[in-house]
Image (cartoon, grey):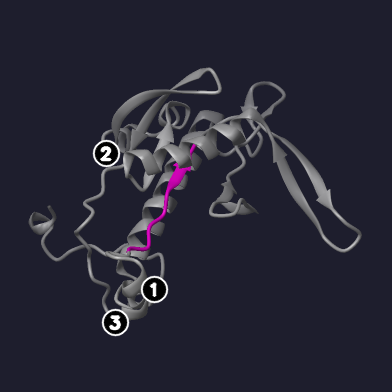
Amino acid sequence: GVANKNLGDAFLVLWKMPEEAPGGTATDGKMSLASQKTEIADRSLIAFVKVLAELRRSEEVLKYVHDSRIGEKFELFQVELGLSLHVGWAIEGPIGSDFKIDPAYLSPHVNVTIQLELVSRRYDLPLLFSESLYNLLSLRAKDRVRKLDVVSIDGQKHGLFTFPMAKDYVVHQPSTHTLGDVIKPEALDEVP
């Protein structure tokens, strides 16, 4: 994904879906269009799960959590993220000045994504995604997520899904860990 916009306490990150070429085939010709979209949907979910896992085990972040100066001002301080995923169309256009131009994405689907992130705070869950993303996930990914609710955003009904992650369980990083690498616990039976 590509970080596109800072929205104050949130970032808009997007993945572009492949377009259909004339004749109904995928533009790259290697995989079917549906397979490409499924792969992007799975990878976007995996990317956000990795972000959350790295946040929980980051020694740099834990320094803030255990800093007594912060603890004096904020009781039970935690660094938390609210992440949301949604699929939909958007109009891409340049916005900027003579010195800097950035792409901007305008769409009601961008607004849905922002609203889903706000809803994640109400549910006290770090990751929520819409049914439109769920519908693109592989069967293997669908087996690992759970439906929470149906919400109305801008008059449209959206199924609300999450990827369950134990809040208090952290797989500690080995000294050879590289940011973003998957860390497998020694015994999976120990995972709550």
**Mark 2 and mark 1: Cα distance apart in space:** 25 Å
What SS does tag 1 mark?
loop
Sort mark 1 into few (<14), some (14-19) or many (20+) by Cα contacts within 10 Å. Answer: few
Q: In this picture, which residue range is highlighted in magenta?
A: 78-85
Residue toward you, 57 or 65 = 65
Q: Are marks 3 and 2 in contact (CB under 8 Å)?
A: no
**Which label was assigned to residue 157?**
none
Q: Residue at x 59, y 30 (%)?
A: 88
Dividing the picture into quadrants, the one containing residue 140 is top left
Residue toward you, 180 or 130 = 130
Sort mark 3 into few (<14), some (14-19) or many (20+) by Cα contacts within 10 Å. Answer: few
**Mark 3 and mark 2: Cα distance apart in space:** 29 Å
Q: Residue at x 48, y 33 (%)?
A: 35
What SS does tag 2 mark?
loop
Residue toward you, 64 or 26 = 64
- Please give the residue where the numbered disc 3 appears in the rendered image: 175
Q: Amino acid at mark 1?
A: Thr
